[in-house]
Image (cartoon, rainbow, N blue to C red):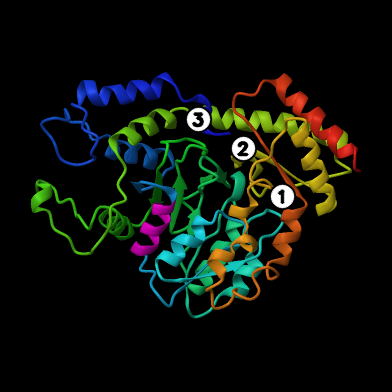
Amino acid sequence: MPGYEIIGEEELKNIQEIFSQSSGVLFAHGFPNQRGGRYRVREFEKQLAENFSSEYCQVVSSRTAAEFVALKAMGIQPGDEVITQAFTFVATIEGIIECGATPIVVDIDETLNMCPIALEKAITSKTKCIIPVYMLGNPARMDEIMKISSKYNIPVMEDACEALGATYKNKSVGTIGHCGIFSLDFGKTITTGEGGFILTQNSELYNLMAEYHDHGHQNLQNVSRGCDTARISGFNFRMTEMQAAVGSAQLLKLSYILQKNRANKRRLKSNLTESISNSVEFREIISPEGELADTLMLFLPNAGTAAKVVALLKEDGIGTKNVPDAMNWHFSKNWHHIWKFHPIYKDCYQEIWRKSDNLLSKCISIPIMVKSFESEIDLVSDKIIKAIRNFI
């Protein structure tokens, strides 16, 4: 599942080289005489852009910073509406609010991602951006979403934080819309501890993001930082050389992580399909050959049965991933602290996303680990089958 499973000597070696070869310079800019010609943050950006076939990449300090920087560069401002989905991490909503815009939240469908029908119904003259979120490794229905984007001339920001490395119809997630944002926190596919990045093919959007994340610096060639110029105000969302050093080592392991994720999920799903396919339904996967495959998501007949199965699994040492254990942070129904001031949702947030609630309440998400042995996967399978057969 996450890059932390295989963090080790390669990452340590890269960090040590900052001190042995670059005088311990941890800042991404300047200090040319001390750093030995190495600008690791810029190198990491090039590696990411090349790996995901993107023209441009901007790394930042976190996933939340990635969204905020991209929204600011897109010109999102007070009075604008940004559409996203009910099943997402709370940061998606926070980024919209911090721009002064109004989040508009639509239901998910059986992919557990944005429902295109609900999306189109929510569009108004104030809609300035669409953010589909690829929850737990599965891309959304991007053909339909991009058609809607084109029809109404509204840009799409892919939130691919939980799907780094996945593809949609042979195209890397994050390169389908106008830009894509990613997380590099310690629980993601690859990690820099904290961190994030943005992919785009648009040069002007990239330039604005690069400037905004660095106090407006244009970073003109052959001009010192002290004499550099700015055309916009900005903030500090920079990544450090140490984070980039770790990220470069992790990126080299991505193919292995994807290979193991997919093989381990295939085995777990095959085991369950043979035994309980008549008792459960699996999440709809739009592009099976390209999914991240870091979770296996099951639908039980109803919420009550799902809760009983989860409790029994917990007793048997089997945990879940986000669903249902972290729904306080991943389902909009639970965010009173946000909606109590919202002009639309303050009086209805507990009831409005009924379809999403119905789907999520009967769902169980099983994490897929990179380092699991086949015998471990088989044991987990047996425990899941036993738990489900207790109630169905």
Which label's residue is closer to the chain start, 3 or 2?
3
SS label for mark 2: loop
The three-letter code of the residue at mark 1 reads Glu
The three-letter code of the residue at mark 2 reads Asp
Marks 3 and 1 sit apart, C-alpha to C-alpha, by: 28 Å
Residue closer to the observer: 378 or 322: 322
Residue 66 counted in the magenta span: yes
Marks 3 and 2 sit apart, C-alpha to C-alpha, by: 13 Å
Q: Which residues are magenta?
A: 64-73
Image quarter (top left, top right, bottom left or bottom right) of the N terminus: top right
The label number, if any, that marks residue 4 in the structure image: 3
SS label for mark 3: helix
Which label's residue is closer to the chain start, 1 or 2?
1
Tell whether 261 sits left or right of 227.
Answer: right
Image quarter (top left, top right, bottom left or bottom right) of the C terminus: top right
Residue under the point 37% across and 30% down: 246
Crowding near the residue tagged with mark 1, few <14, some 14–19, many ≥20 C-alpha atoms within 10 Å: some
Crowding near the residue tagged with mark 3, few <14, some 14–19, many ≥20 C-alpha atoms within 10 Å: some
| Residue 248 visible in the shown view | yes
Q: Is residue 239 above or below residue 358?
A: above
Nearer mark to the viewer, of 1 and 2: 2
The label number, if any, that marks residue 294 in the structure image: 2
Rendered location of residue 74, percent (x, y):
37, 65
Q: Which residue is mark 1?
A: 284
Residue closer to the observer: 258 or 350: 350
Q: Are marks 1 and 2 in contact (CB under 8 Å)?
A: no
Residue under the point 40% across and 52% down: 66
Which label's residue is closer to the chain start, 3 or 1?
3
Marks 1 and 2 sit apart, C-alpha to C-alpha, by: 15 Å
